[in-house]
Amino acid sequence: MATSIGSVKGSSQELRSRFGEDARQRRAAANILDPSEVRGDYDAGRMMETTLGGEARPITNEDLAAFRQNARTAGRRFKGGITVRQVVDLSLSKDRKRARTEIPSAVPASSRQVKGGALETRFMTSSSPQSKHARHQVIVEFVDFEGLVANGSLSPRKAARELARGSIRFDCTCEHHRYRRRYIATIGRYNAGRPETGYPKITNPDLSGVACKHVLRVMSEIEGGSAVQMFLARAIEKARGGGTAVQRTSQKSADRQAQKQDSRPMAANAQETGDRDFDRSRRALRKAAKAASATTTQPKRTAKGSRAAAALGGNAGARDKLLAAARDLGISPDQAAKLLAAAAKDQS
Protein backbone atom coordinates (compact mmCIF):
# COMPACT_ATOMS: atom_id res chain seq x y z
CA MET A 1 0.00 0.00 0.00
CA ALA A 2 1.07 3.57 -0.60
CA THR A 3 2.26 5.36 2.50
CA SER A 4 1.09 8.82 1.40
CA ILE A 5 -2.30 10.12 2.50
CA GLY A 6 -2.20 12.86 -0.10
CA SER A 7 -1.99 16.62 0.12
CA VAL A 8 -3.01 18.34 3.35
CA LYS A 9 -3.56 21.57 1.47
CA GLY A 10 -7.05 21.58 0.04
CA SER A 11 -8.20 18.62 2.17
CA SER A 12 -10.67 20.75 4.15
CA GLN A 13 -12.28 21.90 0.91
CA GLU A 14 -12.38 18.31 -0.26
CA LEU A 15 -14.18 17.37 2.96
CA ARG A 16 -16.79 20.12 2.53
CA SER A 17 -17.33 19.09 -1.08
CA ARG A 18 -17.85 15.41 -0.26
CA PHE A 19 -20.17 16.06 2.67
CA GLY A 20 -22.03 18.63 0.55
CA GLU A 21 -22.60 16.13 -2.24
CA ASP A 22 -23.68 13.56 0.35
CA ALA A 23 -26.31 15.98 1.72
CA ARG A 24 -27.58 16.89 -1.77
CA GLN A 25 -28.02 13.24 -2.72
CA ARG A 26 -29.81 12.58 0.56
CA ARG A 27 -32.28 15.42 -0.05
CA ALA A 28 -33.01 14.12 -3.54
CA ALA A 29 -33.53 10.51 -2.43
CA ALA A 30 -37.11 9.23 -2.65
CA ASN A 31 -36.84 5.68 -1.31
CA ILE A 32 -36.28 6.64 2.35
CA LEU A 33 -38.12 4.98 5.25
CA ASP A 34 -38.61 7.93 7.60
CA PRO A 35 -39.37 7.86 11.37
CA SER A 36 -43.13 8.30 10.97
CA GLU A 37 -43.26 5.29 8.65
CA VAL A 38 -41.19 3.20 11.05
CA ARG A 39 -43.75 4.09 13.75
CA GLY A 40 -46.48 2.58 11.56
CA ASP A 41 -47.60 5.33 9.16
CA TYR A 42 -46.38 3.35 6.18
CA ASP A 43 -48.20 3.03 2.86
CA ALA A 44 -47.63 -0.48 1.52
CA GLY A 45 -48.25 0.93 -1.94
CA ARG A 46 -44.77 2.44 -1.85
CA MET A 47 -43.47 -1.12 -2.24
CA MET A 48 -40.22 -0.52 -0.39
CA GLU A 49 -38.02 -3.51 0.37
CA THR A 50 -35.82 -4.74 3.18
CA THR A 51 -33.10 -7.36 3.52
CA LEU A 52 -34.13 -8.23 7.09
CA GLY A 53 -33.72 -12.01 7.30
CA GLY A 54 -31.13 -12.13 4.54
CA GLU A 55 -33.10 -11.66 1.31
CA ALA A 56 -34.62 -8.61 -0.37
CA ARG A 57 -38.43 -8.61 -0.10
CA PRO A 58 -41.32 -6.18 0.46
CA ILE A 59 -41.57 -4.59 3.91
CA THR A 60 -44.28 -6.01 6.20
CA ASN A 61 -45.86 -4.77 9.45
CA GLU A 62 -43.72 -7.31 11.30
CA ASP A 63 -40.63 -5.73 9.77
CA LEU A 64 -41.73 -2.29 10.99
CA ALA A 65 -42.13 -3.70 14.50
CA ALA A 66 -38.64 -5.20 14.28
CA PHE A 67 -37.24 -1.86 13.09
CA ARG A 68 -38.85 -0.07 16.04
CA GLN A 69 -37.40 -2.58 18.49
CA ASN A 70 -33.93 -2.35 16.90
CA ALA A 71 -34.02 1.45 17.14
CA ARG A 72 -35.14 1.36 20.80
CA THR A 73 -32.36 -1.10 21.64
CA ALA A 74 -29.70 1.02 19.92
CA GLY A 75 -30.99 4.17 21.62
CA ARG A 76 -30.77 2.58 25.07
CA ARG A 77 -27.38 1.08 24.30
CA PHE A 78 -25.81 4.47 23.62
CA LYS A 79 -27.81 6.53 26.11
CA GLY A 80 -24.65 7.77 27.81
CA GLY A 81 -22.83 8.61 24.58
CA ILE A 82 -19.78 6.70 23.37
CA THR A 83 -16.05 6.60 24.03
CA VAL A 84 -13.10 5.57 21.87
CA ARG A 85 -12.84 2.25 23.71
CA GLN A 86 -16.56 1.55 23.29
CA VAL A 87 -16.32 2.24 19.55
CA VAL A 88 -13.77 -0.58 19.33
CA ASP A 89 -15.44 -2.95 21.79
CA LEU A 90 -18.91 -2.63 20.25
CA SER A 91 -17.79 -2.80 16.63
CA LEU A 92 -17.97 -5.92 14.48
CA SER A 93 -14.90 -8.17 14.41
CA LYS A 94 -14.86 -8.08 10.58
CA ASP A 95 -14.69 -4.28 10.67
CA ARG A 96 -11.81 -4.39 13.18
CA LYS A 97 -9.98 -6.83 10.92
CA ARG A 98 -10.47 -4.57 7.90
CA ALA A 99 -9.20 -1.59 9.87
CA ARG A 100 -5.94 -3.26 10.82
CA THR A 101 -5.31 -5.00 7.47
CA GLU A 102 -6.58 -2.48 4.90
CA ILE A 103 -6.05 0.99 6.41
CA PRO A 104 -2.36 1.55 7.26
CA SER A 105 -2.49 5.27 8.11
CA ALA A 106 -4.60 7.77 10.07
CA VAL A 107 -3.16 11.26 10.63
CA PRO A 108 -4.68 14.29 12.41
CA ALA A 109 -4.89 17.14 9.87
CA SER A 110 -6.53 20.00 11.77
CA SER A 111 -8.48 20.95 14.86
CA ARG A 112 -10.81 23.70 16.02
CA GLN A 113 -13.23 24.32 18.85
CA VAL A 114 -16.88 24.11 17.76
CA LYS A 115 -20.20 25.24 19.17
CA GLY A 116 -20.81 23.61 22.54
CA GLY A 117 -17.12 23.59 23.44
CA ALA A 118 -16.04 20.32 21.82
CA LEU A 119 -12.73 19.98 20.00
CA GLU A 120 -13.33 18.95 16.40
CA THR A 121 -10.34 17.09 14.99
CA ARG A 122 -10.15 16.11 11.33
CA PHE A 123 -8.21 12.97 10.42
CA MET A 124 -7.05 11.86 7.00
CA THR A 125 -6.84 8.10 6.43
CA SER A 126 -5.54 5.97 3.63
CA SER A 127 -8.15 4.00 1.71
CA SER A 128 -8.36 0.28 1.01
CA PRO A 129 -7.00 -1.11 -2.29
CA GLN A 130 -10.51 -1.69 -3.65
CA SER A 131 -11.77 1.82 -2.87
CA LYS A 132 -12.59 4.30 -5.65
CA HIS A 133 -11.28 7.10 -3.40
CA ALA A 134 -7.63 7.86 -2.79
CA ARG A 135 -8.33 8.55 0.90
CA HIS A 136 -11.10 9.21 3.40
CA GLN A 137 -11.57 11.77 6.14
CA VAL A 138 -12.91 11.19 9.64
CA ILE A 139 -14.22 13.89 11.97
CA VAL A 140 -13.92 13.27 15.72
CA GLU A 141 -15.40 15.68 18.26
CA PHE A 142 -13.91 15.40 21.75
CA VAL A 143 -16.83 16.45 23.94
CA ASP A 144 -14.91 17.08 27.18
CA PHE A 145 -12.45 19.58 25.71
CA GLU A 146 -13.75 22.78 27.33
CA GLY A 147 -13.85 21.27 30.83
CA LEU A 148 -10.32 19.89 30.54
CA VAL A 149 -8.99 23.23 29.29
CA ALA A 150 -10.38 24.81 32.47
CA ASN A 151 -8.94 22.07 34.73
CA GLY A 152 -5.57 23.57 35.62
CA SER A 153 -4.68 20.70 37.95
CA LEU A 154 -3.79 18.56 34.92
CA SER A 155 -0.82 19.17 32.65
CA PRO A 156 -1.63 19.41 28.91
CA ARG A 157 -0.33 15.87 28.35
CA LYS A 158 -2.42 14.41 31.19
CA ALA A 159 -5.45 16.41 30.09
CA ALA A 160 -4.96 15.05 26.55
CA ARG A 161 -5.03 11.48 27.88
CA GLU A 162 -8.26 12.22 29.73
CA LEU A 163 -9.69 13.83 26.61
CA ALA A 164 -8.97 10.67 24.60
CA ARG A 165 -10.78 8.56 27.23
CA GLY A 166 -13.90 10.74 27.32
CA SER A 167 -17.03 11.02 25.22
CA ILE A 168 -16.73 11.56 21.48
CA ARG A 169 -18.84 12.07 18.38
CA PHE A 170 -17.69 11.13 14.88
CA ASP A 171 -18.44 11.09 11.16
CA CYS A 172 -16.73 9.66 8.05
CA THR A 173 -16.80 10.41 4.34
CA CYS A 174 -17.04 6.74 3.31
CA GLU A 175 -20.13 5.04 1.92
CA HIS A 176 -20.05 2.35 4.59
CA HIS A 177 -20.60 4.93 7.32
CA ARG A 178 -23.10 6.84 5.21
CA TYR A 179 -25.36 3.90 4.40
CA ARG A 180 -24.82 1.54 7.35
CA ARG A 181 -23.61 3.41 10.42
CA ARG A 182 -24.77 7.05 10.37
CA TYR A 183 -28.37 6.17 11.36
CA ILE A 184 -27.06 4.29 14.41
CA ALA A 185 -24.80 7.22 15.29
CA THR A 186 -27.77 9.59 15.00
CA ILE A 187 -30.10 7.70 17.32
CA GLY A 188 -27.15 7.02 19.65
CA ARG A 189 -26.41 10.77 19.77
CA TYR A 190 -22.75 10.39 18.88
CA ASN A 191 -23.05 11.62 15.30
CA ALA A 192 -20.75 14.54 14.38
CA GLY A 193 -22.20 15.17 10.93
CA ARG A 194 -25.60 15.58 9.35
CA PRO A 195 -28.32 13.58 11.11
CA GLU A 196 -29.63 10.51 9.31
CA THR A 197 -33.29 9.75 10.04
CA GLY A 198 -33.85 7.23 7.24
CA TYR A 199 -33.85 3.65 8.56
CA PRO A 200 -31.19 1.50 6.72
CA LYS A 201 -33.80 -1.07 5.67
CA ILE A 202 -31.59 -2.55 2.94
CA THR A 203 -28.00 -1.98 4.02
CA ASN A 204 -28.25 -2.66 7.77
CA PRO A 205 -31.78 -3.54 8.95
CA ASP A 206 -30.45 -5.26 12.09
CA LEU A 207 -28.57 -2.07 13.10
CA SER A 208 -25.40 -4.07 13.69
CA GLY A 209 -21.97 -2.56 14.27
CA VAL A 210 -20.84 0.90 15.30
CA ALA A 211 -18.01 2.11 13.08
CA CYS A 212 -16.44 1.66 9.65
CA LYS A 213 -12.82 0.60 9.19
CA HIS A 214 -11.64 4.20 8.71
CA VAL A 215 -13.15 5.31 12.02
CA LEU A 216 -11.72 2.24 13.77
CA ARG A 217 -8.26 2.98 12.38
CA VAL A 218 -8.53 6.51 13.78
CA MET A 219 -9.65 5.13 17.16
CA SER A 220 -6.51 3.01 17.22
CA GLU A 221 -4.31 6.09 16.81
CA ILE A 222 -6.26 8.07 19.42
CA GLU A 223 -5.74 5.28 21.94
CA GLY A 224 -2.13 4.48 21.22
CA GLY A 225 -0.58 7.03 18.88
CA SER A 226 1.88 9.45 20.47
CA ALA A 227 1.43 11.93 17.60
CA VAL A 228 -2.30 12.23 18.31
CA GLN A 229 -1.67 12.66 22.05
CA MET A 230 0.76 15.49 21.30
CA PHE A 231 -1.72 17.04 18.86
CA LEU A 232 -4.46 17.07 21.52
CA ALA A 233 -2.07 18.39 24.17
CA ARG A 234 -1.08 21.30 21.92
CA ALA A 235 -4.74 22.19 21.38
CA ILE A 236 -5.30 22.26 25.15
CA GLU A 237 -2.16 24.31 25.72
CA LYS A 238 -3.15 26.85 23.07
CA ALA A 239 -6.66 27.22 24.49
CA ARG A 240 -5.29 27.68 28.02
CA GLY A 241 -2.99 30.40 26.76
CA GLY A 242 -5.95 32.48 25.69
CA GLY A 243 -5.75 31.57 22.03
CA THR A 244 -7.83 29.24 19.90
CA ALA A 245 -7.53 25.49 19.49
CA VAL A 246 -7.01 25.86 15.74
CA GLN A 247 -4.17 23.69 14.44
CA ARG A 248 -3.06 22.52 11.03
CA THR A 249 -0.62 19.69 10.37
CA SER A 250 2.13 20.44 7.88
CA GLN A 251 2.56 18.25 4.82
CA LYS A 252 5.99 17.14 6.05
CA SER A 253 4.61 16.07 9.42
CA ALA A 254 1.63 14.28 7.85
CA ASP A 255 3.85 12.33 5.46
CA ARG A 256 6.26 11.45 8.26
CA GLN A 257 3.44 10.13 10.46
CA ALA A 258 1.90 8.13 7.62
CA GLN A 259 5.30 6.62 6.73
CA LYS A 260 5.92 5.64 10.35
CA GLN A 261 2.50 4.02 10.72
CA ASP A 262 2.74 2.20 7.41
CA SER A 263 6.12 0.75 8.34
CA ARG A 264 4.78 -0.93 11.48
CA PRO A 265 4.10 -4.67 11.36
CA MET A 266 0.38 -5.31 11.03
CA ALA A 267 0.32 -6.99 14.45
CA ALA A 268 1.36 -3.68 15.99
CA ASN A 269 -1.53 -1.92 14.28
CA ALA A 270 -4.00 -4.58 15.38
CA GLN A 271 -5.52 -3.18 18.57
CA GLU A 272 -8.04 -6.01 18.75
CA THR A 273 -8.24 -9.51 17.28
CA GLY A 274 -11.93 -10.01 17.91
CA ASP A 275 -11.19 -12.64 20.59
CA ARG A 276 -11.97 -10.53 23.66
CA ASP A 277 -10.59 -12.94 26.29
CA PHE A 278 -7.32 -13.14 24.41
CA ASP A 279 -7.24 -9.39 23.81
CA ARG A 280 -7.59 -8.73 27.54
CA SER A 281 -4.84 -11.24 28.29
CA ARG A 282 -2.58 -9.69 25.67
CA ARG A 283 -3.07 -6.19 27.06
CA ALA A 284 -2.31 -7.42 30.59
CA LEU A 285 0.72 -9.29 29.30
CA ARG A 286 2.17 -6.26 27.54
CA LYS A 287 1.60 -4.03 30.56
CA ALA A 288 3.19 -6.53 32.94
CA ALA A 289 6.07 -7.27 30.56
CA LYS A 290 6.90 -3.59 30.25
CA ALA A 291 6.90 -3.11 34.02
CA ALA A 292 8.99 -6.19 34.69
CA SER A 293 11.40 -6.02 31.74
CA ALA A 294 14.25 -4.56 33.79
CA THR A 295 14.18 -7.21 36.53
CA THR A 296 12.70 -10.39 35.06
CA THR A 297 15.17 -13.21 34.47
CA GLN A 298 14.72 -16.02 31.99
CA PRO A 299 13.05 -18.93 33.83
CA LYS A 300 13.52 -22.56 33.05
CA ARG A 301 11.08 -23.65 30.35
CA THR A 302 8.64 -26.45 30.93
CA ALA A 303 7.31 -28.82 28.28
CA LYS A 304 4.67 -27.58 25.83
CA GLY A 305 3.97 -24.30 27.61
CA SER A 306 2.15 -26.01 30.48
CA ARG A 307 2.11 -22.92 32.69
CA ALA A 308 0.66 -20.85 29.86
CA ALA A 309 -2.04 -23.46 29.41
CA ALA A 310 -2.83 -23.43 33.12
CA ALA A 311 -2.96 -19.62 33.18
CA LEU A 312 -5.63 -19.73 30.48
CA GLY A 313 -7.70 -22.47 32.06
CA GLY A 314 -6.93 -25.00 29.36
CA ASN A 315 -8.29 -22.83 26.57
CA ALA A 316 -6.25 -24.25 23.70
CA GLY A 317 -7.10 -21.54 21.18
CA ALA A 318 -6.23 -18.74 23.56
CA ARG A 319 -3.10 -20.62 24.62
CA ASP A 320 -1.81 -20.82 21.04
CA LYS A 321 -2.44 -17.12 20.53
CA LEU A 322 -0.74 -16.29 23.82
CA LEU A 323 2.33 -18.29 22.83
CA ALA A 324 2.49 -16.32 19.58
CA ALA A 325 2.20 -13.05 21.50
CA ALA A 326 5.00 -14.17 23.84
CA ARG A 327 7.26 -14.79 20.85
CA ASP A 328 6.45 -11.30 19.53
CA LEU A 329 7.46 -9.81 22.90
CA GLY A 330 10.69 -11.79 23.02
CA ILE A 331 9.85 -13.69 26.22
CA SER A 332 9.20 -17.34 26.97
CA PRO A 333 5.71 -18.86 27.40
CA ASP A 334 6.43 -19.44 31.08
CA GLN A 335 7.37 -15.80 31.55
CA ALA A 336 4.13 -14.85 29.82
CA ALA A 337 2.15 -17.15 32.12
CA LYS A 338 3.85 -15.76 35.23
CA LEU A 339 3.25 -12.17 34.22
CA LEU A 340 -0.39 -12.86 33.42
CA ALA A 341 -0.88 -14.61 36.75
CA ALA A 342 0.69 -11.68 38.57
CA ALA A 343 -1.47 -9.20 36.66
CA ALA A 344 -4.60 -11.20 37.43
CA LYS A 345 -3.64 -11.32 41.13
CA ASP A 346 -3.14 -7.55 41.21
CA GLN A 347 -6.60 -7.02 39.68
CA SER A 348 -8.36 -9.39 42.08
Image (cartoon, rainbow, N blue to C red):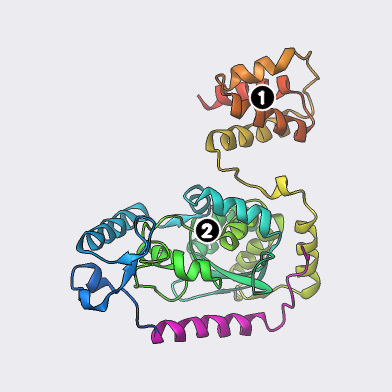
Q: Which mark is residue 339?
A: 1
Residue 114: image location, x then y, percent: 50, 75
Q: Amino acid at mark 2?
A: Asn
Tell me the residue that label 2 is attached to.
151
Between the C-alphas of marks 1 and 2, the distance is: 36 Å
Q: Is 278 left or right of 144, judged from the image as shown?
A: right
At x 34% / y 72%, what residue is drawn?
A: 197
Can residue 171 be seen?
no
Q: Main secondary structure of the magenta part?
A: helix
Q: Is 182 left or right of 38, judged from the image as shown?
A: right
Q: Nearer the viewer, residue 341 or 186?
A: 186
Q: Which residues are magenta?
A: 1-28
Q: Earlier in the sequence, mark 1 or mark 2?
A: 2
Callout 1 crowding tier (Cα within 10 Å): few <14, some 14–19, many ≥20: many
Taking the magenta stretch, the answer to whether it contains residue 334 is: no
Q: Secondary structure at mark 2?
A: loop
At x 79% / y 28%, what residue is drawn?
A: 294
Taking the magenta stretch, the answer to whether it contains residue 26 is: yes
- The mark lying in front, picked from 1 and 2, is 1
- Above or below residue 114? Residue 66 is above
